[in-house]
Image: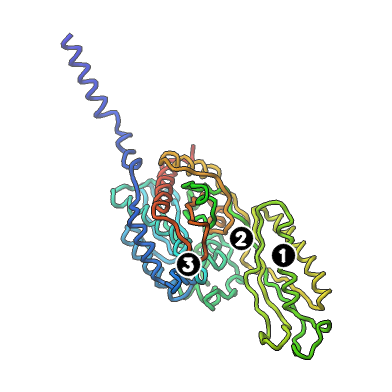
Amino acid sequence: MRNRCAMLVVGLFVCFTSTPRAVQREAPYRHLRVNARRIEQRILQLAEFGKNPEGGVSRLAFSEADIQGRQYIMSLMRQAGLRVHIDAAGNIIGRREGRDPHLPPIMFGSHIDSVPHGGNYDGDVGVIAAIECVQVLQEHGLVTRHPLEVIVFSDEEGGLVGSRALIGDLGPEALRVVSQSGQTIREGIRAIGGDPDRLEEVVRHKGDIAAFIELHIEQGSVLDSRGIDIGVVEGIVGINWWEVTIEGFANHAGTTPMNDRRDALLAAAHLIIAVNRVVTSVPGRQVGTVGRIRAEPGAPNVIPGRVVMSLELRDLSAEKIHMLFQKIKREAEVIARKTGTTIRFTPLDVTAVPAPTDERMRAIIAQVAEELGLSYMFMPSGAGHDAQDMARIAPTGMIFVPSVGGISHSPKEYTRPEDMANGANVLLHTILKIDQGALEK
């Protein structure tokens, strides 16, 4: 009996000391968490570059503020142990080697350029969180199987420039577009350390990247209003832009009778109303916007003879965008006849195609949120993101965290520190699950 008891004790000792090696290997991964305070501090520090009096940033792509912000980000990447370089498109890429040099990298990141008078969280949260994920791995001495690449895309706000270059879709016409900084895209890429004459070197193809993940603020009110922690993005809308030129006849405002005028600005006003009417007449989540308008010659005592304005249409369906545009064009023809003007639509080379995210990636993100005890919902993205380009060459997933009040592209944009940390933890554990083979199951 005594011998049996001794054997049982030895057996239990062996069971608890030698069997759980796999569990011991996985335990550090399961319990890893990001440093929420560090994320918040770095977000606030990044906000100093391009800071404006309203409390947000005007860190336009290719501007001096953008260049300074990029220098700061590269310093953080190096602190996290990443090997950093700027590719020919101006993208910042920080690489950490994995245990298996034959595996393609897992890529994750976002952007730090802003719109004029923008906020401190759009894009920034995804970049700072991406660096944080690598720094946590570095601090715990954990090396993934796959190489990891943190990317900061160039000029996201001006038309997804960096990601378009990565998929081989940044052509000569796009390089001639004048950015918000006043420089052409070609000039801007050079200003931030890229080389627009060598864009072919940055192109990645299917199979070159194991997966791409982007963490981003929602920029809408759905998560915040419903008290939900995480948005699992199902797809990203397509975006089409046009420049609309209306030609009338400039004449003296005091001596030209109302019925003899060819007022380009009046035609523009009718067209803006028509855009709203057309877009709202069709069921769905599509949106249409005229966000920029310039009247010439721009004097209070001269009838505007020429107007140049923008038109943007967004939807998850490219076919619906085309249908809406054709309806708007027909409305424009009627307006032109009534006002004695001509209306011309010129497509701009900043089109982003609708992009569903990878079903497996959605499932992994949802599983991670559950395991972390976070509430989540599946939802579309009404804003464009670099992830929609990356979805054309790699399994892509996107994680949303709440925007307080649904405010974005504004100095009042805000995401709570705990929400940023939640998103970063989901990003971290999504990366680890992919590294452990979750996409292969």
Q: Is residue 330 left or right of residue 385?
A: right
Q: CA distance from mark 2 to mark 3?
A: 26 Å
Q: Is residue 265 left or right of residue 144?
A: right
Identified by mark 3, the residue type is Pro
Identified by mark 1, the residue type is Val
How busy is the neighbourhood of tag 3: few (under 14 within 10 Å), some, or many (20 plus)?
many
How busy is the neighbourhood of tag 1: few (under 14 within 10 Å), some, or many (20 plus)?
many
Provide the residue designation for mark 3: 411
Q: Position of residue 298 (x, y in %)?
A: 66, 85
Question: Residue placed at 72% from the left, 64% from the top?
Answer: 275
| Residue 9: quadrant of the picture | top left
Q: Nearer the viewer, mark 2 or mark 3?
A: 3
Q: CA distance from mark 1 to mark 2?
A: 20 Å
Q: CA distance from mark 1 to mark 3?
A: 28 Å
Provide the residue designation for mark 2: 352
Identified by mark 2, the residue type is Ala
